[in-house]
Amino acid sequence: MPDATGLELLARELGDAALETVYYRNRATVVVDPAQIRGVLRTLRARGYAFLASVHGVDHYPEEPRLGVVYELLDMSRVDRITVKLRVPTDAPTVESVTEDWPTADHQEREIYDMFGVVFEGHPDLRRILMPEDYEGHPQRRDFPIGGEPVIFTRDEAKWLEARE
Amino acid sequence: MSPAPTPVDSPALSDYRRREQSIDLAPVGEQLVGLDHENETTEELLTLNFGPHHPATHGVLRLLVTLQGEVVRDLKPIIGYVHTGIEKTAEDKAYWKAIPIVERMDYLAYYFNAMAYVGAVEALVEVEVPTRAQYLRVIHLELNRIASHLIWLGTSALDLGASSIFLYCLRERELILDLFEMSSGARMHTRYFQVGGVIEDIPAGFARKLREFLKVMPERADEYGAILNANEIVLQRLRGTCPLDAETLLGLGVTGPLLRAAGNPWDLRKAAPYSSYEHFEFKIPVGTVGDNYDRFAVRLAEIYESVKIIEQALEGLPEGPHITEDRKVALPPRHELATSMEALIHHFKLVTEGFRVPPGEVYHPIESPRGELGCYVRSDGSSKPARVHMRDPSFVNLQALAPMCRGNYIADMIATTAMLDPILGGIDR
C-alpha cells in the first residue's frame, strides 16, 4: 500500500480526475471521476500497478450517487495495492469498459452489469452472467428484496410465461 | 413426463430459449482463416453443448464449443447454474453469522473462504488475532489446501482415464476430514474460523493424529507421482498441451498454480504474508513452459510444501488464547456465563444483534488453492455487512480456458479443464 503521503502524491499526479482520497485501515483508495476512469487506470498502470486484481460493484443506497464500481490494482514487483473507486447514479449508470486494457475485467464487468445494472460502454459481450438471461431487475441492489423468488421448472414453463402476459 | 419439443418460432418459447436455439455462427467463421490441417476433409462447423451435466466439467459448467472436426475453434463458458445469491444473503446476516454461508462458496476450500471473510472483518474492526489462533489457522488452511489438491488430482486423473488414483486421493482426504471433525465437529463447512481467532482450541490427541498424517502424506504423494509420472498415456495427454504464457495469464487476471506453472512465482503467502505465514520456511514450486504437465506438477509439489508448513506450525505452536479476549466481538467462554453477569450480557448482545462494525470498505486477499481469493466487505456502521463480494479465483481463471484451448483438440480441452481446476460453487456463488 502507498502510505498516506504517497497516496496524496499519486492523486496529484492524476490531476482533476481524482475527486477524493481515503486512507483507511492501511489501505489506499482514490475516488475518481467516472468519465475519466480509463485514463486514470492507464496512468496508474504506467506507475507500475499493472495487475487488475478485482472489480466489485457496490450499492450505496440510500446515498446518491448510488452505484459504485471498485477497481483493485496491484503492483506485483513492489507488492503494493491501490483501490480506485467511482460512483454513478442509477438513472445514468454508464461507465467506460476497461476490457481492452485488462481482458480480466470481462467476466467481472458482466457480473456488475448483472447484479447492479451498471452499463459498461465498449464491453464486447455485455450480457447477464450469473442470473438467467431473461431475468428482470438487478438483484444485488440494496432495494431489491430478499426472497419471494418463484422457481420456474421446465415442466411448467409455459404456465409461467402465460401468467406473465 | 417430458413435454413435446417446441419449434423455434413457437410463441410459447421465451426470448431466451429462442436465442439459445438459434446460435449465430458468423463470428466464429471469421476465425477460420489459415487452416493448417490439410487432412481435414470437412469445413463444416459443429456447435457442441458441453455440459452443464457432464462428468468432465467438474460441476455444472456449460461450455459452448465450436468444433471443426476434432479441433476446438471457439469456446464460450456459460455459468450461473448454481448461483445461490450467497452475497445477497450475507447482507441479511450479522457479521459472524455470515461465516457459515460464505464458507459454502468454494466448497472444496471452505477454510479459505472463511479466512478471506474474517480477515476483512478483522481489518475493519481492528481486532488483534492471538498468535496461537494464527498458527491454528495456518494448520487448517494448509490441511484444506492438501484436501483440495487431492480432490483436484483424483478427479483430473479420472478425466484422463486413470480411475484408481481417485480412490487413493479420497483415502488421504478422509484422514484430513477426520482431523477437521476432531477440531470442529464437522467434516466440511466447519465454521471453525471466527472473527478474532478460532472457535475452539484443538482437542487432546489432535496433534498426535496430525503427526501421523504428516508422516503418511509425503509417502502417499510420492506414490501418486510414481503412478502418474510413469504413465505414458497421462504424460502424452499433459505434456505440451494447451500452454499459455505468463504475460497473457496476467492480463486475464489468472493467479495461483496456473500462473506459477508458467514460471511466475507469485504467491501471496510469500509476497504479502498474512496470519503469520512469514514465520514458516517453504518453497514456491514453479513450472517452466506453462503446459498442462506443469500445472499438474506444480500442484503435486505444493502438497509437500503444505506438509512442511503444517509441521513447522505444529512444532512452533505457541501457548495462549485461541481467540481474542475482546468480548465485544468474540463469545465469552461457556463457564463464565454461570458466574459473570457481564459475560452473560456480552453473550446476549452478540447472539441477538451481533457486533457493530465501523463504517468503511476493505479488500482482503489471501492465497487459496486456486489463486488470489479476495473478500471485499463494506460496512455502513450497522451489525450487518452492506456488501460482501468474493473475488473468486475460479471465476476469474475460467476466462483463460478459451485462449488455452483454441486450436487444440477436444481431448486436450478435457485435460485443460481438469488442470484449470474450476470449482463451480465458487464461480457462481
Image: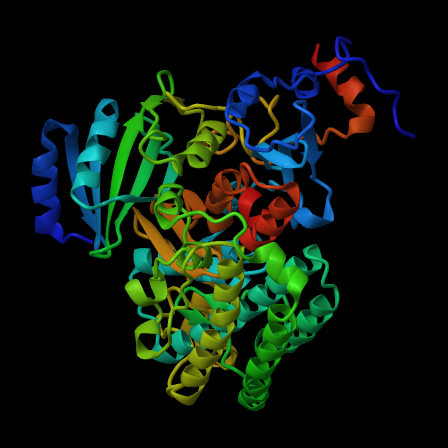
Q: Locate residue A97, reporting x and y percent.
A: 35, 26
Say left or right for B183 vs B10: left
Residue B429 lies in quadrant: top right
Q: Locate residue A56, reporting x and y percent.
A: 38, 39
Say left or right for A115 vs B169: left
Say left or right for B261 vs B54: left
Q: How many marks on residues? A: 0
Say left or right for B51 vs B96: right
Q: Is residue B429 visible?
A: no
User: Farthest residue in the right direction?
Assistant: B1
Given residues A128 and B250, the one toward you in this image is: B250
Is A157 rendered above or below residue B394? above
Residue B127 lies in quadrant: bottom left
Which residue is located at x 64 percent, y 19 percent? B23
Given residues B388 and B405, the one toward you in this image is: B405
Q: Is residue A156 visible?
A: yes
* Coloring scheme used: rainbow
Which residue is located at x 54 percent, y 70 percent? B146
Q: Locate residue A70, reporting x and y percent.
A: 32, 38
Given residues B368 and B241, the one toward you in this image is: B241
Residue B151 lies in quadrant: bottom right
Locate the C terminus of chain A and report the quarter of the image it occupies.
Answer: top right
Q: Locate residue A41, reporting x and y percent.
A: 23, 35
User: Farthest residue in the front direction?
Assistant: B38
Locate the N terminus of chain A and report the quarter of the image it occupies.
Answer: bottom left
Which residue is located at x 49 percent, y 76 percent? B304
Which residue is located at x 35 percent, y 79 percent? B281
Is B404 rendered above or below residue A124? below
